[in-house]
């Protein structure tokens, strides 16, 4: 069988997908849902205004919040 003949067998033919059932029934695991021990999440806060001038950041309040490991501003970087 040539490559052209083999290709014709797949074009327009249904392909049995084995990996979908567990994902569609809620029993699968997505990489985004995994959280190994010690994993941290990061959030980047940007101004909601395109041309605004940021005159101050209350990073001290964020640092005091429960679960916060670190807060970085441009001054820290």
Image: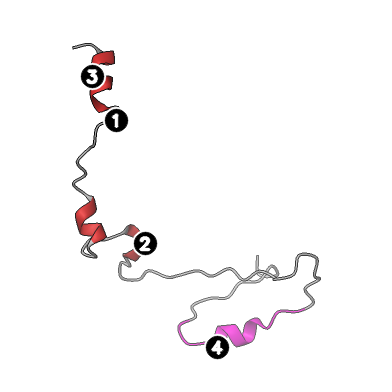
Q: Which residue is drawn at 19% across and 41% down?
A: 16
Whether tag 4 and tag 3 are in contact, CB under 8 A, the answer is no
In this rendering, the answer to whether 49 lies above or below 10 is below
Whether tag 4 and tag 2 are in contact, CB under 8 A, the answer is no
What separation in Å lies between label 1 and label 3 (alpha carbons)?
A: 12 Å
Mark number for residue 32? 2
Q: Which of pointers 1 and 4 lies earlier in the amino acid sequence?
A: 1
Q: What stretch is highlighted in magenta?
A: 56-67
Which residue, given by chain and number where applicable, does mark 1 sit on? 12
In this rendering, the answer to whether 37 lies above or below 9 is below
Q: Which of pointers 3 and 2 lies earlier in the amino acid sequence?
A: 3
What separation in Å lies between label 4 and label 2 (alpha carbons)?
A: 28 Å
Q: Where is residue 59 in the image (x, y as percent from the top left)?
A: 64, 81
Q: What is the crowding at mark 3: few (fewer than 14 residues within 10 Å), some, or many (at least 20)?
A: few
Between 49 and 39, the one lying in front of the other is 49
Q: What is the crowding at mark 4: few (fewer than 14 residues within 10 Å), some, or many (at least 20)?
A: few
Between 70 and 28, the one lying in front of the other is 28
Which residue, given by chain and number where applicable, does mark 4 sit on? 64
Q: Position of residue 31 (x, y in %)?
A: 33, 58
Q: Does the magenta stretch include residue 23?
A: no
Q: In the visual, does 28 lie left or right of 67?
A: left
| Tag 3 secondary structure | helix
Q: Which residue is drawn at 42% across and 70% down?
A: 40
| Tag 4 secondary structure | helix
């Amino acid at each position: 069988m040539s490559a052209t003949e083999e290709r014709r067998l797949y074009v327009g033919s249904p392909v049995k997908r084995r990996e979908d059932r567990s994902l569609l029934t809620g029993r699968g695991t997505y990489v985004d849902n995994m959280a190994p021990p010690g994993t941290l999440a990061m959030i980047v806060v940007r101004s909601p205004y395109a041309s605004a001038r940021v005159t101050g950041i209350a990073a001290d309040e964020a640092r005091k919040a429960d679960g916060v490991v670190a807060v970085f501003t441009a001054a820290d970087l």
